[in-house]
Image: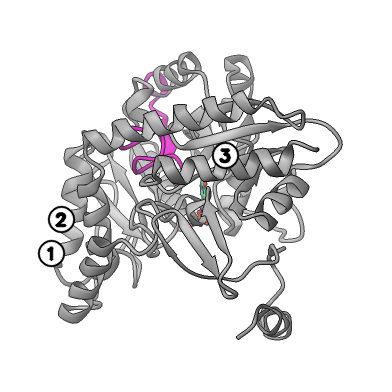
Amino acid sequence: MSFEQIKQLDHQYVMQSYGRFDVAIDHGKGATLWDVEGKEYIDFTSGIGVCSLGYGDEEWAKSIYDQALKLGHISNLFYSEPYIKAAQKLCERTGMSNAFFANSGAESNEGMIKLARKYSFDRYGKGRGTVITLNKSFHGRTITTLAATGQDVFHNYFFPFTEGFRHADANDMDSLESVAGHDVCAVMMELVQGEGGVLPLDAGFVQKVAALCAERDWLLLIDEVQTGVGRTGSLFAFQQYGIQPDVVSFAKGIAGGLPFGGIMANEKCAGVFTPATHATTFGGNPIAAAAACTVLDRLDDDMLAQVKEKGAYLREQIEALNLPCLGATRGMGLMIGIEVKGEKTNKELAAKLIANGLLCLTAGPGLRLLPPLTITKEEMDKGIAIMKQTLSAI
Ligand SMILES: *Cc1c(COP(=O)(O)O)cnc(C)c1O
């Protein structure tokens, strides 16, 4: 099919809930993609932080193929080895106690919120179900995770939203204290706010929140759907913040491109979910779990150190371009935000870069880069060259 045919059929048969860019990607290798007409793109997006090992990774594909031939699905009513292996790998490397697997970020966060409310209900009874989240956060697109999301633009159309969420300003303990109350059971936050604009929280603030949570027996819920699984240069971002969450959620990059996600709980919260209190048909699917095991094995200390080096290199190179339309960079590891200055919006800049062969994302008012963790120096340099050539005149 030609691009024009694909686009026409998309508009005819697909709900138009995405403002898509004018590209139909066909295949990829490493951090390089080709569209249906054979044009090449350097990928600074990895989906949205999903394809952690890039495209066409042989080992990843083989683990999927082998598991699909062996057992493609089994109900969670039965034990299954890939599920247990993935959970063990995650717990052993994070100090968390146990895991529950789901299929997406929003669904994982729903599980995390349910766990917090049940923890509180078991100890204190009704009336203590409120979760404090941060302004500029993003926690998902279900009715409940939209309510959790601290951005007014998401609180439209779909009333009534789930009750029991209050929002505080990031890096501001006074703001957090001002929304606290006897009805609170948890604080939920991203350590680097992704969709909000790649905004890393201050470590001091995060540690104070952790201390307050411990003092009041609120659960500390960390949404690592975007920051988790190597993205920031450690397996999870919380490992660089000097805290241990009560529950942490993850999804996007965990299975390198297959739908997978979940939560891990610490010892205090490990027994909250009991039979029939939380479940999913597909969550923990053996094929996705096998892919997750491959991703986790590949993310050894050497690879994580490289993520930090590559992130620093990309930021240096971008800042050295001194482009008039771009300001400072920020972020952690290969999760990078770039400030946008001047007349053009971030969406306009992204569209120009994409048209010239560099896929990138927007977040808040800036640009956002989430390249595959396996991106090579050569691919990064190609991407930077496209940036220079495209944005110099703007
Ligand atoms: C993407 C994202 C989500 C939602 O994940 P889905 O898989 O799209 O449901 C939740 N939280 C954060 C921090 C995210 O970046």
- The type of residue carrying mark 2 is Lys
* Labels 2 and 3 touching (C-beta < 8 A): no
Task: Give neighbour class at mark 3: few <14, some 14-19, many 20+ (Cα, 10 Å).
Answer: some
Task: Identify residue for label 3.
Answer: 384
Q: Where does residue 41 sit, x and y in percent of width and height?
A: 55, 58
Task: Identify residue for label 1.
Answer: 81
Cβ of mark 2 under 8 A from ligand 1: no
Q: Nearer the viewer, residue 354 or 290?
A: 354
Q: Is residue 391 left or right of residue 207?
A: right
Q: Quadrant of the N terminus?
A: bottom right
| For residue 63, above or below residue 114 | below
Write down the region rendered in magenta.
Answer: 214-236
Task: Give neighbour class at mark 2: few <14, some 14-19, many 20+ (Cα, 10 Å).
Answer: some
Tell me how far mark 1 sits from mark 3, CA to CA: 43 Å
Q: Nearer the viewer, residue 293 or 321?
A: 321
Task: Give neighbour class at mark 1: few <14, some 14-19, many 20+ (Cα, 10 Å).
Answer: few
Q: Where does residue 39 sit, x and y in percent of width and height?
A: 58, 66
- The type of residue carrying mark 3 is Ile
* Labels 2 and 1 touching (C-beta < 8 A): yes
Q: Regarding mark 1 in the picture, which secondary structure is present there?
A: helix
Task: Identify residue for label 2.
Answer: 85
